[in-house]
Each structure stands twice: as structure tokens, then as C-alpha cells.
Image (tube, grey):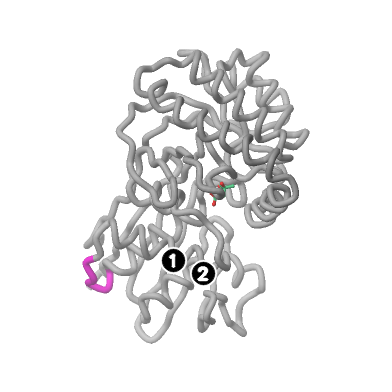
Amino acid sequence: MPCVKTRASAPGKIILFGEHAVVSGTPAIGSAVGLRARVTVEDLPGRLEIALRDMGLTVTGFSVGPNGEVISLGSSEEAARAARYVAGVVRELDARDIRVIVESEIPVASGLGSSAAIVVAALAAVSSHMGLDLSVNQVAAQAHGIEKMVQQGLGSPMDTALSAFGGYQMVCGGASPLELPAIEMVVGCTSRPHDTRSEVARVQELRSAYPEVIGPIFQAVGEITRRAIPCIRDGSLMELGTLMNMNQGLLESIGAGTRELSELIYAARGAGGALGAKLTGAGGGGCMIALPEPGRQRDVLIALAQSRGSGFPVKTGAEGLIVETGIR
Ligand code: MEV
């Protein structure tokens, strides 16, 4: 009898406005984008296996520690580290006798929400394969808990909410959906990975050292974020670009920029003719986003390539979690 599989996919994300300031309570806006993580689950009687197809890594015969760490004698350290988000899902659901296959188009350690998309897709695929009927709300909440556990306490609900629900989300404490139209943007990645945890810690230390300086900067970021909402709703792209550039200036002031990110940002605004460009996520490496003039996505992509960045076009407001059951 052919084995019946369950598959789920979830999107990555970009933060449009408000990163870092959101950690201190001002609003941030993020959007799901078309890059997706896909997780397929099939029966594997008597065994438990995680296969990370893009990395060519497999983890088998393992147990999972209290923070989702993978304890395995037979697997490399690299495989065990890469598999820990899926292992967190396996532990949460007490799953067994399955193979979990992960494939992802989302670059890792780049601030594009790859770990959240994998956790959301894995949680939905494994729970559905086990016959558990989790709502999207439950998937989003549990996935956020698992991501936080693996990252040891860090992580706003932005990434898991966007991966589960798609569209746009505003985060201010919790996450809530925003009904806004899609816009065409470009993502450009530097070759330097970023580390959200250490960037957030560094910025929060700066805030403690200079509260009178950083407090008003975060207030200004919050105001930029609030003003961006009607611009996206009404298609006021010129003003939206100006707000992105202002947000970037403030991110520079708290040390989140890097030379590589600036090169891509100025290439997009200059030769690419972008209306606005800023880093996305925690900074210190990772990716930037640019808002092209309508019909000029290609010009921005060429400008990024000329500055040694890898760029790809995205549309905001992409679809959230999709689950397919009974695949043969
Ligand atoms: C990271 O993608 C965004 C930050 O604001 C951290 C967070 O919101 O958890 C830097």
C-alpha cells in the first residue's frame, strides 16, 4: 500500500518598519513574502527521522532535550543544530514513527523568518499527520512558544504570526492582522549572516546606557510605523519610500547598519531608482528591502547584483500556512 503523506508549507517574512524599537513597546509592521518552507511527514514504523533536504543532512535515532536540543550519537553536530526547531516540534507533540522532510527556499540566518516558517509548517504537518486538529491560531501560538524555547527566550510573535496567517501583521506586544494591499518590493541579501539575539541585546544595552537619546529615537520609529499604514493602504509609494529612508537613518543611529547593507541600500536608491530602502530584521548583516518605482523591480535587482548582493523580487501580503493531507 502506498504510504500516505501530509505536507504543510509556510511563508518567510520581511519587517517593513519598526524593528528593534518594537522590543521596547512601539509598533512594528511585517509582511509575509512568497518564499516558503515545506515540511512533508510520512510514516516510518519504529523510527524517528528528520531530513533537511537543502542541507543534505539527516538526523535519526535521537532524543530531544528540554530546550529542543537534539541528542544523537549517530548524527553530526551540524545536523543536530540545524534540526533543533523540528526537534522542538517533535518533542511538543510527542511524535514518533515518522520521517519529517524539510525543504526551504528561505535563506537561513538572514532575518527572513526561516526558523519560524519551518516551525509553523512542521507543527501543522506533524500534528495533522497524527490526526490532531490544531487551528491556525493554535499553530501560531505553539510555534511561537517552540521558537522562543529553542532561541532561549528571544523572539517577538511577528515571525510565527506571519508564517501562520500570512498577509501583514502589526506587532505591539501581541500580533494583529492588518488588511492592506500587496506591493512589489525587492529583497537584497549581504553575504554576512546575522544574529538576532546578540543584535537585540546590543541595542537594548545602548538603550539602558542612553535612555534620553534612544527613547526618542524609538518614539520616532513608532511614529514612522504608524504613518506607513495609510501610505500602504492608499498606494502612496513616494511617501512610503521616504518613511523607509527615515527608518533606515534611525536604525543606523542605533548601530544596526553595516557597510555591506549600506552598499546595497545606496545601490538600490541610486542606480536602482528605488523610492526607499532600509535593512530588514535585526541588522548587523542579513538583508535589506527596497521599494522600486512601479515597473522598475528589475533595475533594483541589477543595481544589487552590481554591488555583490543577491537580490530577488517579492510581493508583500503572501498567503500563510497551507496544509495538504492524504498525499500519495
Ligand atoms: C528581528 O527580526 C526583529 C527585532 O525587532 C527583534 C524582534 O522583534 O524580536 C530586532
- The residue that appears at 58% across and 59% down in the rendered structure is 55
**Front-most of 281 and 300?**
281
Residue 39 location (% of width, % of height):
40, 59
Which residue, given by chain and number where applicable, does mark 2 sit on?
Answer: 149
Q: Which residue range is magenta in the image?
A: 129-133
- The residue that appears at 50% across and 13% down in the rendered structure is 238
Callout 2: helix, strand or loop? helix
Is most of the magenta stretch helix, strand or loop? loop
Please tell me whether residue 326 is drawn above or below residue 293 in the rendered image.
below
| Residue 209 visible | yes
Residue 48 location (% of width, % of height):
43, 79
Please tell me whether residue 65 is drawn above or below residue 152 in the rendered image.
below
**Residue 92: quadrant of the picture:** bottom left
Q: Is mark 2 within 8 Å of ligand 1?
A: no
- The amino acid at mark 1 is Gly
- The amino acid at mark 2 is Met
Callout 1: helix, strand or loop? helix
- With 154 as the anchor, is 101 left or right in this view? left
Q: Dot 1 surroundings within 10 Å: few (below 14), some, or many (20 or more)?
A: some
Q: Are marks 2 and 1 in contact (CB under 8 Å)?
A: yes
- The residue that appears at 71% across and 33% down in the rendered structure is 252
Residue 89 location (% of width, % of height):
42, 70
- The residue that appears at 54% across and 55% down in the rendered structure is 54
**Residue 43: quadrant of the picture:** bottom left
Query: Gap in Å between the C-alphas at discs 2 and 1?
Result: 6 Å
**Residue 286: quadrant of the picture:** top right
Which residue, given by chain and number where applicable, does mark 1 sit on?
Answer: 145
